[in-house]
Image (spheres, grey):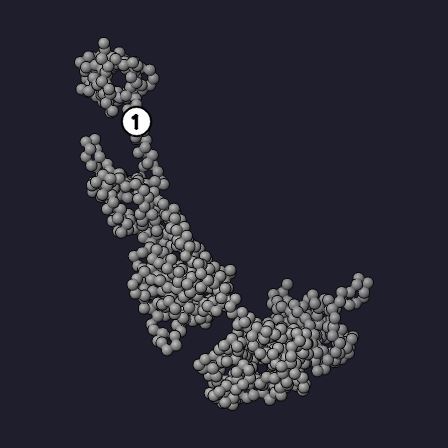
Amino acid sequence: MTASPAPLPQDAAVVLVLGEDDEVLTCTPDAEDLLGQPAARITGRRLDRLLEHREPGVVLLTRPGDAAPLRLRLTTVDLPGGGRARRLATLAPEHTVHRHEEDQAVVRALFAQRRVGIAIHRADLLITRLNISPEVLLRTTGDTGNAAPAQDSGDIALPARIADMLVPDDAEAISERMRQVVDGGEPVIDWEHSARLRDVPDSERVLSIQVFQLRDRDERVQGAVSIFTDITEQYIARRRMALLHAVAERIGATLDITSNAQELARVLVPGFADLAGVDISSRMLSGDEPDWTVPGAEMRRLGGESGRPDWPAEVYPPGARFLVEEFADPRLSDSRALREPWPDAVRTRRIAQPGSDPGPAAHQLPQGDGSRMIVPLTARGQVLGALHLWRAPGRLPFSRQDAWIGEEISSRAALSLDNARRYTREHRTVETLQRSLLPQPVVELTAARTAGSYVAARTAAGTGGTWYDVIPLSSARVAFVIGDIAGHGLNATATMGRLRTAVQTLADIDLSPEELLTRLDDLAIRLADAEHEPRDGTGAVGATCLYCVYDPVTGDCTMAGAGRVPPVIARPGQPPETVPLKTGPPLGVGGEPFESVRVRLEPDSWLLLFSDELVAARAGDGDILEPAEHTPEERMNLLRAEIAAADGHTPAELGQSVLDALLPRRAPDSEVALLVARVRCLAEENTAHWSFEADPAVVGEARNAILGQLADWGLEANAFATELIVSELVTNAIRYAGGPVDLRLIRDETLICEVSDPSETQPHLRRARPTDEGGRGLFLVAQLAHRWGSRYTARGKTIWTEQLLDPEPG
């Protein structure tokens, strides 16, 4: 029986030295293990007699006891020189060679990767081979700062240390884990760790690292191999989802604004930031719309959380109140996050609590080193406040990815805060309605600069019904209005809204002050009759109103009052005085007719309209307060003194100083309104006036006059439209009203054209039929003008038009 050959070793291979005729001159001692014959029998035999060639590089060997020939891989190398030995031949089993080639292919594939890094480390952890430099692998898809350009491993001098590539903290942590692998042999699988580059230390990058121990044939430790991939994007996504999940779970559980704000700060510290402050418009606490973007707005730090034991002394603590004085970046009025702002992106001034020292705090975030980010809290298109975040030095600065996360969190949190605000608003309907019906505090017009102030009553029983208004009129004029409704509460607020709308409507048809109050008086009676109100001062009946019309061209101010105290005026260089106005009875009461008075106001004169309660110190039911701090006369003297000292002040500043002087300590029992106006006059060169007889021939003169004036003003681009308007209006006036006809041009923010005639018949716009020879004049005027209208005058009527200024011809 023939014995079976011994099994082949895993790495069996034979080296043969061949002569000139491929005879075997010598071979390695282990040839018998592979070839099945002793070396003595192999030596001297020709290779083709020993092996059977089948295909290039592959030979067959039939060994004793084998069932099938053994496939061997044959590799030959020519030897230099002219000696007896001519070639070297290597024989190895084909499967062994194939496995070796696969191993080499794997190594080559790994070292050829540009998305997977592989490094070979010696036992001392020095890197001896590296397929790709960290700058290439750690591609900075987020914020990179001043990132170095990508380079390949050829630019790195090997051997190199890990600390030569990464920041010290990250290099030390990774080296420590590799040391454990080299010393203990336990591999590291899918270990995630920060790997910030030394050249870009502020860019957050995270690697997934595998580390394996390397041994030689004799099982001696040679070092380690590390395989690493960049998982920064996945890491940030997981962190983002975890943080958003926490925000969704913990914020919005209640409808209390303060609780939601504090919970938002707790969610973000210490995982996302080391300090968080949630600043909300103070108006939101009462359910009002936020006023974050308005300079002077009051803010409240409703939530605050710090990762340190002590709150920084220079930072507003939770509960602090402060005023926004100035915004240093327009993005704060948007929903975008502002990273790395200068120390005060929002300049503020702290409001001291009653009876306490405001302390040194004057900043939203810690000063000095560290990373800062401000994220506006925006919901339903409104900015409610801002989320202020800070990271301590030594921690990664806020990146663009952090900004996106912050914006998402702020959006969700802001929605919860706004829901809480809307819930609160439902409980404050009366006060909210009252404030919403008032105009903007400051109004800038050509005729005047005004500032209105409204001071709510100390109690709900005194709220509702007081109002003021500034109404632009035709021909650059302006109307100043102030009034109140008898009674308080929701009904009084609703009635106030009706009367204010009625005043605006009547003002639009340019009624004189006394005529407007007469119409308003009739309306008050009709409202009382329609709602079956008793005429006891609980509705529109008994309401008061003061209506003033100021003309900046002439400087005349005409006014009439119904149950109001007269206004106070102060001409430049003269002491303040009360207008000698004979006020009529309250609206709907009846009795004497309303009378108007006309006063002349020089440029920069002051005009103050105010509630009776400001100077009379009356409660909501009309009774004198006891004991009065000042008599009405003393309070009026205080008012005049503040006006006299207002040189160089703005209307808003004067209004505030008056309120501070007359309402120094607490809110009044009844609401107070104050309207301060500083009037202006149009320069004489901005107006032009002509008077013509009732002769059709003067139409051409009128056209020539206005064309010359427009040329002097540099408004030739408006000449064509103005010429047509003047032609139509002057022609109609001569044809239907007679003379004289007055023509006036006013250059203001618009070009105003006025044609006055003695007729009191108001014009009516109609559409002429195709067969009509005329009737298209007013239609053309309406098409050419931006606005047009007519008003009665003491001598007849005036038709006016406004055109937008077009300094560029065509």
Q: Give the crowd class for mark 1: few <14, some 14-19, many >=20 residues within 10 Å.
A: few
Image coords of residue 269 (percent x, y)? 35, 58
Q: Is residue 722 visible?
A: yes
Image coords of residue 307 (percent x, y)? 32, 60
Locate residue 806: give its quadrant: bottom right
Which residue carries the number 1 mark? Answer: 99
Image coords of residue 488 (percent x, y)? 56, 77
Locate residue 801: give its quadrant: bottom right
Callout 1 amino acid: Arg
Image coords of residue 240 (percent x, y)? 40, 51
In this view, 470 is above or below 262: below
Q: Is residue 126 left or right of residue 553?
A: left
Q: Secondary structure at mark 1?
A: helix
Quadrant, the N terminus: top left
Nearer-the-camera pick, 787 or 346: 346
Nearer-the-camera pick, 14 or 362: 362
Q: Is residue 440 visible?
A: no
| Residue at the image point whose x is 44% and y is 64% from the top | 257
Locate residue 98: give its quadrant: top left
Residue furthest toward the top?
Answer: 1
| Residue at the image point whose x is 50% and y is 89% from the top | 631
Q: Is residue 87 left or right of residue 409?
A: left
Number of numbered discs overlaid on the protein picture: 1
| Residue at the image point whose x is 68% and y is 66% from the top | 784
Quadrant, the C terminus: bottom right
Nearer-the-camera pick, 624 or 748: 624
In this view, 692 is above or below 302: below
| Residue at the image point whose x is 51% and y is 69% from the top | 428
In this view, 287 is above or below 654: above
